[in-house]
Image (spheres, rainbow, N blue to C red):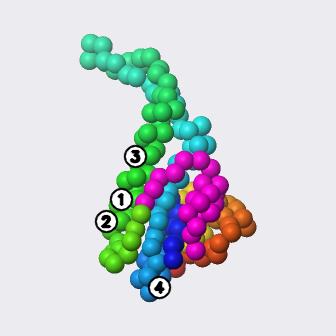
Amino acid sequence: MKLLVPVDGSLASFNAVKKSIEIAKLYHFSIKMITVVESTSLSRHNRNERLWRQVDGSIIAGTTRTRGDEELTSELRENAQSLLESITKELDFEGIEVETEVLEGEAYQAILDEAEKGGFDLLVMGNRGFSKIKRFFVGSVTQRVISEAKCPVLVIHTDSEE
């Protein structure tokens, strides 16, 4: 049996990973942790960097350079991979087959696509994302996944304890 666990760095998603470990150890499931680099993230990041230069000991504004999509995507993917690696190092996955992957796209759609493509038996995810603004919408990604997933979804709250 296979668990899919989307993570975004929030406490809720971290708690979801902890719960998935508990389930996997109890029922001998494998775990695949994913994180999604959202395509809309690129438009939210400032693509212009101000280059400063120093003249006669004084710092003055220089030219502006535009960061390309490839550079931003690469940086976001590296950060996402670091997140997955830090979780696998911090928690005890002993005896569990674990796989990690960074996906690109709109978060809810990437999660649903991976769940279906991979034939997962259960999705375990946090009830709300990292952003405080998203908390107002009670986990818009989670809500969409719940309503459209073809497999069961276990939602773990931010304040859940083991």
Q: Which residues are magenta?
A: 100-122
Of labels 4 and 2, earlier in sequence is: 4
User: Alpha carbon of mark 4 to alpha carbon of mark 3: how far?
Assistant: 32 Å
Rendered residue at 42%/63% (across/down): 99
Q: Earlier in the sequence, mark 2 or mark 3?
A: 3
Find numbered disc 1 in the image and state the secondary structure of the residue it sits on: helix
Mark number displayed over residue 78: 3
Is the Cβ of the residue at disc 4 closer than 8 Å to that at disc 3? Answer: no
Marks 4 and 2 sit apart, C-alpha to C-alpha, by 22 Å
Identified by mark 1, the residue type is Glu
- Total labels drawn: 4
Q: Is residue 113 visible?
A: yes
Tell me whether circle 4 and circle 2 mark residues in contact (CB < 8 Å): no
Q: State the mark number for residue 85.
A: 1
Mark 4 or 2: in front is 4
Q: Local crowd at mark 1 within 10 Å, few (<14), some, or many (≥20)?
A: few
Question: In the picture, residue 42 is in which quadrant?
Answer: top right
Instruction: Name the one closer to the observer, 9 or 81.
Output: 81
Residue contact between numbered discs 2 and 1, judged by CB atoms under 8 Å: yes
Q: What amino acid is found at the position of numbered circle 2 in the picture?
A: Lys
**For mark 4, what is the residue?**
27
Q: As shown in the figure, which amino acid type bears the numbered disc 4?
A: Tyr
Q: Farthest residue toward the left?
A: 57
Mark linked to residue 89: 2
